Amino acid sequence: MYNDIENLGMADKFVDDILEIINHIKLFEGFSVDEVRVLCHYMECYAAPRNYTLLQEGDDGDYLLLLLSGGVEVRKRMPGQGEKLIAEIGVGATLGEMSMIDGNPRYASCITTVPTDFAIFKRESLNDILVQMPRLGNKFLLILLQLMTSRLRNTCERFLPTGVYGAPI
């Protein structure tokens, strides 16, 4: 998957570091320290240099990324306009969750702007947690859905004309 960058090992080796930045990690909001430790057992960490493509638009993907340090630009190819910057993402953000959930190709490309450490959480790991610890798995899914709907609402507010998105869907 990421053979050309540094594999830092399983995230459970970095639980203390992750707990230090936990207030920046929306995905872990609402989880106890013990639950975060369990989730870290299912993630693997990597270090990528500046200008490294973490996710490529159109590629398959069955995992999400959690940014532990650094930053990323999210870029989308637009017909007749080339590639456009659609977001700048920092520590604590998740990337790739849509493809992990729905199995569709990556919607956008994500390129590091500085050296960046990140954790990978695979669909297979989510399935394992749902079977072995259904309460934790369901809690994870609910928070992931909340993050995705929040992102969708923010995107709609940014790109739709004023007044179009006034009422809830």
Image (cartoon, rainbow, N blue to C red):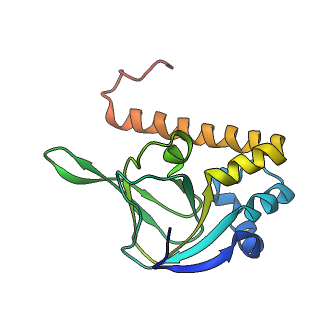
**Which residue is nearer to you in this view: 100 or 85?**
100
| Number of marks drawn | 0
Choose top left, top right, bottom left or bottom right for residue 67.
bottom right
Q: Where is residue 163 in the image (x, y as percent from the top left)?
A: 36, 21
Q: In this view, does 82 lie to the left or right of 143?
A: left
Residue furthest right in the image: 34
Q: Is 117 placed above or below 142 here?
A: below
Q: Position of residue 149 (x, y in %)?
A: 54, 35
**Which residue is nearer to you in this view: 13 or 17?**
13
Q: Is 52 placed above or below 58 here?
A: below
Q: Position of residue 40 (x, y in %)?
A: 74, 63
Residue at the (81%, 63%) spot, across then down? 37
Residue at the (32%, 30%) spot, across then down? 160
Q: Is 96 placed above or below 8 here?
A: above
Q: Is 125 placed above or below 130 here?
A: below
Choose top left, top right, bottom left or bottom right for residue 16.
bottom right
**Which residue is nearer to you in this view: 43 or 142?**
43
Residue at the (47%, 18%) spot, across then down? 167
Q: Is residue 33 left or right of residue 54?
A: right
Q: Position of residue 38 (x, y in %)?
A: 81, 59
**Which residue is nearer to you in this view: 71 or 117?**
117
